[in-house]
Structures are given as structure tokens and as C-alpha cells.
Image (cartoon, helix red, strand yellow):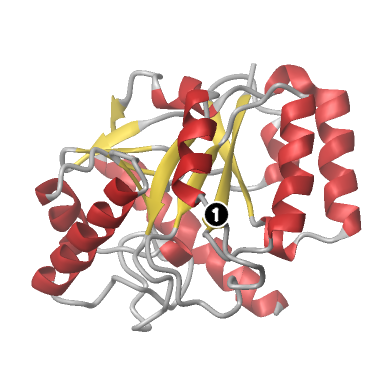
Amino acid sequence: MRKIAIRIDDVAEDMDWEKFRRFEKILEENKLAPLIGVIPYNKDASIARGTPAEDFGGWLKKKQAAGWCIAMHGYEHLYKTKAKGIFPLNPFSEFSGISYKEQCRKISDGKKRMALYGIDTAIFMAPGHSFDENTIRALKKNGFQYVTDGFGNGPFVRDEMTYLPIALQKSKEFEKKSGITTFVVHTATMRDEDFAAYEKMLSEKRKFFVDYRELLETPPKVQTKGQRIKEYALAWMKGFLCRLRG
């Protein structure tokens, strides 16, 4: 049976809390614990839509205690380059194309900020799904063990880093017979029909959904060269088709 975990991107002190709470309620009603990607120093105006939380760190620790997993979602969430990186879904990046030294500084500073929130995480979530070899080097230098990206039927290892895959196409994931993957959610851009769709999906297909920790604890396999080539081609094609559709 295909298993599906949930990850929520763009979590920040000043995010649109109303929409986040709305999706949070859906998860809680279905007793489902996701992964949330926390931006250490959010400077993305498209995300900063709400009043900053008074005790964001305390809230994060409560969610972690409730079984939610937490990732560090980039640094400032500002796209600095047009480099696609090694997972070419998007032609923009906060990290790809930047020097190892600068990436290492950002990742180190971001981790310190997470520590001020009381959170120690080994999971990295790249803004725009874009990162390169220098990102991976900098992540390993700073103690990260997981990247929540890539395509596959379960966690895989490449270059001593474990990847936690995302879904290639949501509508077809339930048809597959085995494996585990992730649905990516951006609560700030969700519309009424999107919330309704998730409520309906979880009502009808709850048996397919698992806590994100189950994905995290699934033993990874070593990615072969052929699988790497296929993954790169699929990511490039998916990105191209998304841009073509506008």
C-alpha cells in the first residue's frame, strides 16, 4: 500500500496564521503529524502576511512534543540566483550557484536561530526545492543528515545524505502499490476549495496517510546511477511543464 506523509512549507513567525490554523485543524481531526519547514529569518514578503507570534519557539516545542517533525527551511527564503541545482524543478534558488563558504555561513546561522527557538533539527528543506553540491557539503558540515526532496518510492542515500522524497504527481500516488512519499503543502496559498479537497481526501483515503516520522524512520536505500538520472529528468520535465502551464 502506498503511504503518504505531509510536509508544510513556509512556516514563520509572521506567516498567515489564520490559514495555517485552518489546515492544522484538519490534521488534528485526522490525528496526523506532519513535517513543518521553519524559515529561520524570514524576509520573503509573500510569506510575511500575519502578526508575528509572541512565543514562536514555545509553539514549535509544543508541536514537536505532539509528534510533529521540524525542518530548517532555508535561511531568509529569498531567491538569489537562477541556478537550478541538482534537483531542477525550478530555475531559481536561495542556495544553488552560491559559494560553499557563503552557503555554510547561512546554514550555520540558520541552525543557531533554530537553537534559539529551542529546536535542534537534522532535516533541511530547500526553498524552491533548489540546492547544489555546495549545499550538501555545507549541510553535512553543520550536522544535517536529511534533505526533504527528491523523487522515489522511499528514503534514499546519495553522497552520504539521506533524501526524503516528495510526490511526483499527487493524483496518481494512491494507485501505486508500495512505497512512501510526501505531499507538499503551502497553507498561505490555499483557497477554500483546496482545504475542502484535503478534507475530502483524508475522509476517503485516510488509510494511506501516515505521520511524517514513519517516513523519517523508514530505512533508506542507496540510489543507483540510473535512478539518479531518471530523477533528474523527471524533475526537469515536471518543472518545465509547470512553467509552460504558467
Which corner quadrant of the image does residue 197 belong to?
Answer: top right
Q: Position of residue 58 (x, y in %)?
A: 48, 41
Which corner quadrant of the image does residue 102 belong to?
Answer: bottom left
State the residue at coordinates (70%, 21%). Answer: 31
State the residue at coordinates (45%, 53%). Answer: 38
| Residue 80 visible to an observer of this rendering | yes
Q: Position of residue 104 (x, y in %)?
A: 14, 63
Q: Is residue 199 above or below residue 38?
A: above
| Residue 152 visible to an observer of this rendering | no
Q: Please state if 214 lies on the left or on the right of 31 as rendered.
A: left
State the residue at coordinates (53%, 41%). Answer: 59
Q: Quadrant of the C terminus?
A: bottom right
For the residue marked with disc 1, what is the amino acid? Asp
State the residue at coordinates (41%, 79%). Answer: 79
Q: Which residue is mark 1?
A: 9
Q: Is residue 91 above or below residue 193?
A: below
Closer to the camera in the image, 202 or 35: 35
